[in-house]
Amino acid sequence: MAKIKKSILGHFCLEGKTAIVTGASYGLGRAMAAGLAEAGADIVAVSRKLKNLEKVKTEIENIGKKILTVECDVSKLAQIKNLVDRTIDMFGKIDILINNAGITIRKEAIKYSERDWDKVVDINLKGVFLCCREVGKIMIKQEKGKIINIASLMCFTGGITIPAYAASKGGVGQLTKALSNEWAKFNVNVNAIAPGYFNTPLTKPLIENPVRYNEITSRIPMQRWGKPEDLKGAAVFLASDASDYITGHILVVDGGWMGR
Ligand SMILES: NC(=O)c1ccc[n+]([C@@H]2O[C@H](COP(=O)([O-])OP(=O)(O)OC[C@H]3O[C@@H](n4cnc5c(N)ncnc54)[C@H](OP(=O)(O)O)[C@@H]3O)[C@@H](O)[C@H]2O)c1
């Protein structure tokens, strides 16, 4: 064990670290929370409904790590402040923040209401900014921290009938770079992961549409959709000391889709 700690493998270890994961109740967030816990971190799991966090709570406890579950809508500043206060009360610090909570509304642009637009952008972009800002204040004081924003391939492409989603994810990519520039001097790394097509509740409508499903699958060089567990490695890497000299980067995890 002592040998591993000194080796490069030791730099991937998250033992003693505290990680907030938003949108940890299902899909990608739940898998990344489990990945961080497997690497040694204690977890603060966030969702709009406490009840939705029961499964991840059991999973993290079975891994042998501590978990705090917090009900918080990431588009609401007061609730984010409460999340940060509760995390500090329990763990005294925040080493890692994964901004994963996100939604989409699929509609043609001309049918997209202002309300649809605001809902998506408030959660996917404003929510990421507010969580970064509130947790960033703590990390700047600590002079150490790792922020990982979950973007999307829609950081780079426009998608189909998801105008607010594509705009919000493009914004997440740019926000990641903007904050990484400001906070590098405080030893706070801000990176993003851009997942390709993953099988989760969010993508159910695509999976259930055979035309879209086949179209997408045939474009993926690996010829399969991602499983939420496929994100664990990238999340642990960007959360760990192994990525200390990486900031402002958008790491694509997509089975090769972007390169095609
Ligand atoms: N699946 C993909 O193929 C894919 C690809 C690229 C990017 N992404 C991104 O990855 C992230 C996770 O996606 P997913 O596929 O895992 O989606 P998902 O299965 O629908 O899960 C979304 C998560 O976000 C939470 N959430 C939604 N709105 C929230 C809010 N206002 N405040 C707090 N939590 C909120 C949900 O929890 P509650 O409902 O319990 O509140 C849930 O835990 C999203 O940002 C998504 O855009 C996904």
Image: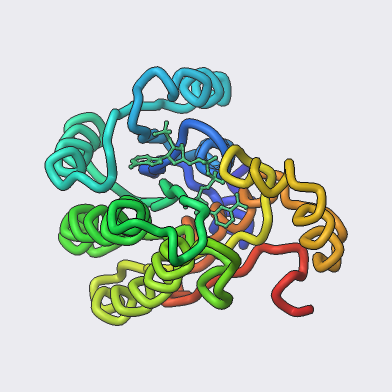
Q: Classify residue 231 as left or right of residue 73.
A: right
Q: Position of residue 251 (x, y in %)?
A: 57, 69
- Up-down relation of residue 75 to residue 167 (above or below): above
Q: Residue at x 73, y 51 (%)?
A: 226
Counting every numbered tag in the picture gives 0
Would you say residue 104 is visible in this rendering? yes
Q: Position of residue 124 (x, y in %)?
A: 37, 56
In this view of the protein, which residue sits in the foreground, 243 or 48?
Answer: 48
- Up-down relation of residue 167 to residue 200 (above or below): below
Quarter the C terminus occupies: bottom right
Q: Residue at x 23, y 64 (%)?
A: 143
Quarter the N terminus occupies: top right
Q: Position of residue 133 (x, y in %)?
A: 20, 60
- Up-down relation of residue 188 to residue 182 (above or below): above
> Farthest residue toward the front?
110
Quarter of the image where one finds residue 161? bottom right
Q: Residue at x 55, y 23 (%)?
A: 59
Colouring chosen for the image of the structure: rainbow
Q: Residue at x 47, y 31 (%)?
A: 25
Quarter of the image where one finds residue 175? bottom left
Would you say residue 3 is visible in this rendering? no
Q: Classify residue 251 as left or right of residue 25.
A: right
In this view of the protein, which residue sits in the foreground, 59 or 195?
Answer: 195
